[in-house]
Structure formats: C-alpha cells, structure tokens
Image: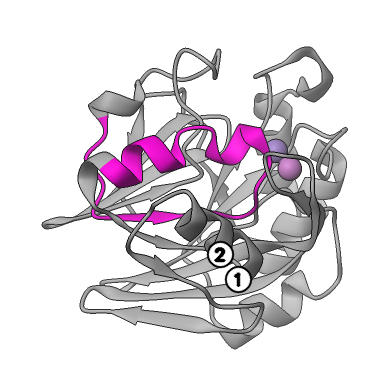
Amino acid sequence: MEIRFLGHAAFEISDGDTRVLIDPFLAPENPAAVARPEEVEPTHILLTHGHADHMTHVVEVAKRTGATCVCIVELARWLSEQGVSDVADPNLGGTVEFEWGWVKLVPAFHTNTLPDGRVIGLSAGLVIGIGATTIYHLGDTALFGDLKLIAERTPVNVALVPIGGHYTMDQQDAVTAAELIDADTVIPMHYDTFPPVEADPERFKRDVEASPRTSSEVVILKPGESHTP
Ligand code: NI
Ligand code: MN
C-alpha cells in the first residue's frame, strides 16, 4: 500500500489493482502538482467538496477512466449531470463499501459550492479503510473538537492534515488537530500552493513530534513523493 502526494490536497492511494485518487487538482492548473490529468489512472475518485482546488479535473478523469466517484450527495448529483456515470452519493455519516474497503464521509467545518458558484452546504472529510490501513483525509476543515470523536470511533493510521491556514485550519491549529486524532503518521497538505496558504512544514513536524499529547510521526512529502505505512 502506497500513499502518493500529488500536490495541494490531491493524493493517490494504491493497493494492488486499486488506485484511489482524492481531490484531483492537477497540473498545470495546480502550480504544485507533478501529474497532469492524463497521467492518472484511478479506479476510484473521492472528493471532499466542490471547490476548484479539489476537483478541477474530476469530470475529465472520471469520464476517461470510468472510475467510481464518491462524494456528498449534492456534489454527486452535479457530477451525474456532467455525464459521470458511476457516482456514489452518501451524506455525512454514510459509508460506501467496495471490495477493497470502505469510504465514510465525516463532518468538516468548511463551505461547499458547485463550480457555477451555487452554495450546496457542507464539505466532508474522508475516512478510508483500505486493506488493514485507515486513512483520514481531513478536507479543508477548520479545527473542531470532534476530530477526537471521529478518531476514537475509527483509529487512524495516517492523517492527511491541512496546515496552510486562510482557507483551512492553520499550522498551530493543525498541531492540536494532530493531538486530537493521534494517528500513527501525519502528512501535512494544503500549503505553499498559493501565497495565502504558506506554511512551515518542518516547524509543524517539530511541534507535533515534541507534543506530549500525541506520539504521531510527521512525514513531509513533496509533490510526487510517496509514503508506505
Ligand atoms: Ni475549499
Ligand atoms: Mn481547498
């Protein structure tokens, strides 16, 4: 099992023949991305919400590959309207099961809009069970206390945590988030893509690893790099 960071909030999780693409915002629109939309071959695509920096390339990639998409119901309906044929549409709290594992939508304190600007309510976080590993992609959330509840309900091996601030929790709040989740491994994301989300991942790593409230290890990935839990 391998977690590849594609830049910003985009990741690809590979396990055997399964390739799960999360929040496809790829090159060249994503200045931090190493992969272009024609260079990914997902079997499944998961979305945290409808903002452009999370799904610019979802329709293009889903139509080319036939990948199964999973996202919150209003966004799922929009994907279907764009001609994406294989869409699962849970709401918060819902779990979608596959032969390789499952995806659960959990709360994220962040807005959500469609590409035409229509407001559609809430964003999601994604708790993903793949093989024996549980991965929690926090989406664009602000800090909130139920991160602890979510991680108690499903202990997290790898947490993908935004640290860039401005549109999400900032890196000080992300240290507290890491303490609440207490994953084995934390991978920072959603920083240094654009000027408003600059952060210092090395300092984030030092702060988390110095905390007495968690034993999480922080793994900093550059776009294109991978981590094997
Ligand atoms: Ni967003
Ligand atoms: Mn974002």
Mark 2 is surrounded, within 10 Å at the Cα level, by few (under 14), some (14 to 19) or many (20 or more) other residues, namely some
Q: Name the residue type under label 2.
A: Arg
Instruction: Note whether 195 is above or below 181 in the view shown.
Output: above
Q: Residue at x 47, y 12 (%)?
A: 28
Q: What residue is pinned by disc 1?
A: 73
Locate residue 57, reporting x and y percent: 45, 33
Q: In the image, is residue 19 above or below residue 153?
A: above
Rendered location of residue 217, percent (x, y):
54, 49
Q: Quadrant of the N terminus?
A: bottom left
User: Is residue 92 on the magenta stretch?
Assistant: no
Of 226 and 107, the residue lying toward us: 107
Q: Quadrant of ligand 1?
A: top right
Q: Secondary structure at mark 2?
A: helix
Residue 194 appearing in the image: yes
**Crowd around label 1: few <14 · some 14–19 · many ≥20 (10 Å):** some
Compared with residue 133, is residue 61 higher up or lower down, i.e. above or below? above
The reply to whether residue 213 is visible in this rendering is: no
Magenta region includes residue 44:
yes
**Residue at x 83%, y 45% (from the top left corner):** 169
Picture layout, residue 146 above or below residue 109: below
Q: In the figure, residue 141 lies in which quadrant?
A: bottom right
3D distance between C-alphas at marks 1 and 2: 6 Å
Mark 2 sits on what residue?
77
Disc 2 within 8 angstroms of ligand 1 (CB): no
- Do residues under tags 1 and 2 come within 8 Å of each other at their CB atoms? yes
Amino acid under disc 1: Val
Left or right of 104 in this view: 45 = left
Q: Residue at x 33, y 35 (%)?
A: 226
Q: Which residues are magenta?
A: 40-63
